[in-house]
Amino acid sequence: MSRFAHPAGDRHAEVLPEDRPPHAPADLNSIDPVIWPRTSERIAGSLTIGGLDVRDLAKEFGTPLYVLDEHDFRARAVDFRQAFHDGEVHYAGKAFLCREVARWIMQEGLGLDVCSAGELAVALSVGFPPDRITMHGNNKSIAELEKAVTVGVGHVVVDSFEEIARLGYLAEKHGARPKVLIRVTVGVEAHTHEFIATAHDDQKFGLSLSSGAAAEAARRILAMPSLELVGLHSHIGSQITDTAGFEVAARRLATLLVQIRDEHGVELPELDLGGGYGIPYVDGDESPDMKVIADALREIVSTVCRGKGLPVPRLTVEPGRSIVGTAGVTLYEVGTVKDVEGLRTYVSVDGGMSDNVRTALYGADYTARLASRESTAQPMLSRLVGKHCESGDIVVRDLYLPADLVPGDLIAVAGTGAYCRSLASNYNYLPKPAVVAVAGGKARVIVARETEEDLLRGQL
């Protein structure tokens, strides 16, 4: 069984067999700048991020702790904005969103994608311009749609016939005319885990191109004076590191654009190819160059549309993980070190699947390091596990840690900025960790650690 079974670079759905563990890294203390935040380095043996020693962060804010490198986050947002300078970049809030992150996105000139009334409320609470917000979701409630209409979000991505009817009614009720994109299921098989592949027909998102549902959606929207159809939307999956799938999607979307033009005499001005750009999690993972990807997508869309006699639509992309993923690191304290003779050593930390469910959910892989000191000890085949009452409570399935690891040491796990805090739970009644932003030698809490009082709130 190959751990490289997913050519898109993902580390999902493949479990490394016990008789073939990963190779030990040449240096157990190394901090690969491709995998770790841009400001990460070791100083006097200890990992530092944003100019701050992780030992000091753990002492002041406790563990587990999400650490977010503000410089890294902002720099990647700027990279995207510059790469797609002639289009639109909307940050996918589902990856990780809080009020401070919404401010960063607003300040760096990006738009924002939200998937619920809650995410919309976060954005509006900091004065995020509604016209730079796109509302997503496969089952938006009437209340969510009404909120989107009344605050004037820039775009609503419709996902079903029922939603078109609801949105049309609400828009007429409030005297509004929201801009609408049709989420099209284009039938592209992204090389990724089945739970995050979103463009094949047999799944919950979008309206099928092959069945004619997407074309019928266009007919229904164009028949409603209260809705303005401005374009098509496609999202083929997540953790993708090449443009092959996007090229197929663009070609199939162009076919629908031609059909809409020929049938209705309408040339749609916008094309949203979604997000899903991957990040490196472990050695050997690819690190996509956003400028190269932007140039490739731009060329793909231009070539396809011109070849079909269409004006080139304005291109929108929706990065989330690729902005916040590498910017985030999770700090844990080692609690127990248990050697299982002939197999491996189980290193238990003070968090687990409640703060990072991705390993249990997708079989995701990560890079982790002893962070509070350097070590010259021999590498020890390990499994980094949490404290929950589940055998699947694994943070990193297969890794090497120094053989002199002891309780009280700090372990840092890289690449946890995306879909860790967002998917966090209170399983076993563990409070969710704090999120601390670091920059220029200063740290501040941007999401407070939950307390036992928070856990009990609302219970009778």
Image (cartoon, grey):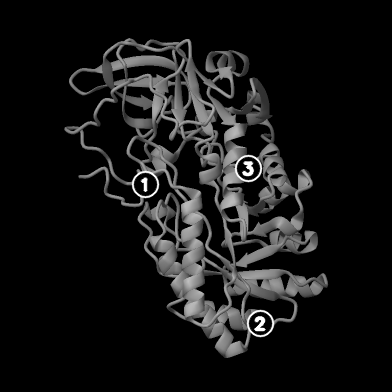
Query: Quick one: label 3, few (<14), some, or many (20+) residues within 10 Å?
Result: many
- The answer to whether residue 352 of the structure is visible from this angle is no
Residue 326: mark: none
Side (left or right) of 458 relative to 82: right
The quadrant where residue 130 appears: bottom right
Q: CA distance from mark 2 to mark 3?
A: 34 Å
Separation of residues labelled 1 and 3 (CA atoms): 23 Å
Q: Is residue 385 visible?
A: yes
Q: Please name the amino acid that badge 2 sits on.
A: Leu
Q: Which mark is residue 10?
A: 1
Q: Which residue is mark 3?
A: 97
Q: Quadrant of the N terminus?
A: top left
Question: Which residue does the image show at 65% across and 23% down from the upper left?
Answer: 443
Nearer-the-camera pick, 44 or 255? 44
Residue 240 in the image: state x and y as whole percent: 42, 52
Residue 168: name its quadrant: bottom right
**Which is more toward the observer, 41 or 192?**
41
> Which amino acid lies under the numbered mark 1 shown in the image of this protein?
Asp
Asked whether the residues under the numbered discs 2 and 1 touch, taking CB atoms below 8 Å apart as contact, a structural biologist would say: no
Work out whether 216 lies above or below 321: below
Q: Amino acid at mark 3?
A: Leu
- In the image, residue 383 lies at what x, y percent? 32, 26
Residue identified by numbered label 2 = 222
User: Dots 2 and 3: beta carbons under 8 Å?
Assistant: no
Point out the tag, 2 or 3, that comes first from the N-terminus: 3
**Label tally:** 3
Specify which label sits upstream in the sequence, 1 or 3.
Answer: 1
